[in-house]
Amino acid sequence: MALLAIKDLHVGLESGEKIVKGISLEVNANEVHAVMGPNGSGKSTLAYSLMGHPAYEITDGKILLDGTDIADLGADERAQLGMFLAFQYPHAVPGVTVANFLRTSVNAIRKAKNGGEDDPIKIPDFRKQLATEMDRLKVPKDMMGRYLNEGFSGGEKKRVEILQMAMLQPRMAILDETDSGLDIDALKIVAEGVRELVGPTMGAVVITHYQRILDYVKPDYVHVFVDGTIVESGGPELAEKLENDGYDSFLKG
Ligand SMILES: Nc1ncnc2c1ncn2[C@@H]1O[C@H](COP(=O)(O)OP(=O)(O)OP(=O)(O)O)[C@@H](O)[C@H]1O
Ligand SMILES: [Mg+2]
């Protein structure tokens, strides 16, 4: 059984406009799938709909996580089952520090795993895990006391998204253009962090426009996403072909 199985998924806007038009995709643990496609083709819409964003309506199809259909669940329930989305445009949450946010998120997942009973992580354990992950991802210590994403640079927001992923240890991570805004050094650190976390208990979908992150993430599969559907799938060589030739040959005339 695939870790994540998307079956003939159709997603529309509240206006009724269809954006995702029949996606089928299986992602296993230990696998990284890259999704590449032109602006406005529906990649973020797919990502949001996998996570349960209320603005996007699933009109047909299934999303199975470990065999459970999550398509009708709320975003919090999906997170508890192990879905994680790193946003293309992370929102600021004034009044909530990064440290508090991370601890609350970790505890919410632990509570769900403990059958709904509170099971808060011990503060020293949390600090230790946080220090390890911050070190690995080179996130400056002083960011922990700042309000989440408030005044953060583009690259700082993206690093904190990945720090969140590392702390929550999801089953399935969807990364929506996490590479955009990262400088070359941060890109390498973040991409290698993703590759290290992907393993026997985790798989990932990496949405990107650029080959560079894929050089470090080393995807197992690459999918070309055009106008709401996957038009071609292949190995890493497909990303190189796209980098050289663009999407022309995939666009309808
Ligand atoms: N909430 C919304 N309201 C109105 N239109 C929307 C909404 N969300 C998405 N769209 C439209 O759906 C289409 C797909 O958008 P989406 O953000 O999924 O594209 P994308 O493939 O992620 O593009 P990019 O590469 O630029 O990030 C676009 O035409 C966009 O304007
Ligand atoms: Mg997008």
Image: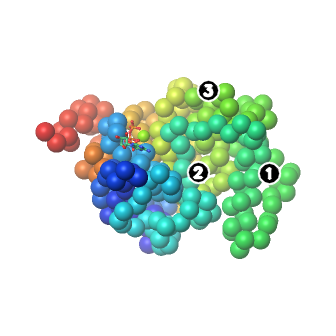
Q: Quadrant of the C terminus?
A: top left
Q: Which residue corresponds to the image point at 72% horizontal and 71% vertical from the top-left?
A: 116
Proximity of marks 2 and 3: CB atoms separated by less than 8 Å: no
Q: Quadrant of the N terminus?
A: bottom left
Q: CA distance from mark 2 to mark 3?
A: 24 Å
Q: Going from the N terminus, do you reach mark 3 or mark 1 first? A: 1
User: SS of the residue at dot 2?
Assistant: helix
In the displayed structure, does residue 36 sit left or right of residue 190? left
User: SS of the residue at dot 1?
Assistant: helix
The residue labelled by disc 2 is 197
Classed neighbour count for the residue bearing mark 2: other residues with Cα under 10 Å, few (<14), some (14–19), many (≥20): some
The residue labelled by disc 3 is 153
Proximity of marks 3 and 1: CB atoms separated by less than 8 Å: no
Q: Is residue 209 above or below residue 72?
A: above
Whole-percent x, y for residue 226 in the image: 28, 45
Three-letter amino acid code of the residue under disc 3: Ser
The residue labelled by disc 1 is 126
Q: Going from the N terminus, do you reach mark 2 or mark 3 first? A: 3
Q: Going from the N terminus, do you reach mark 2 or mark 1 first? A: 1
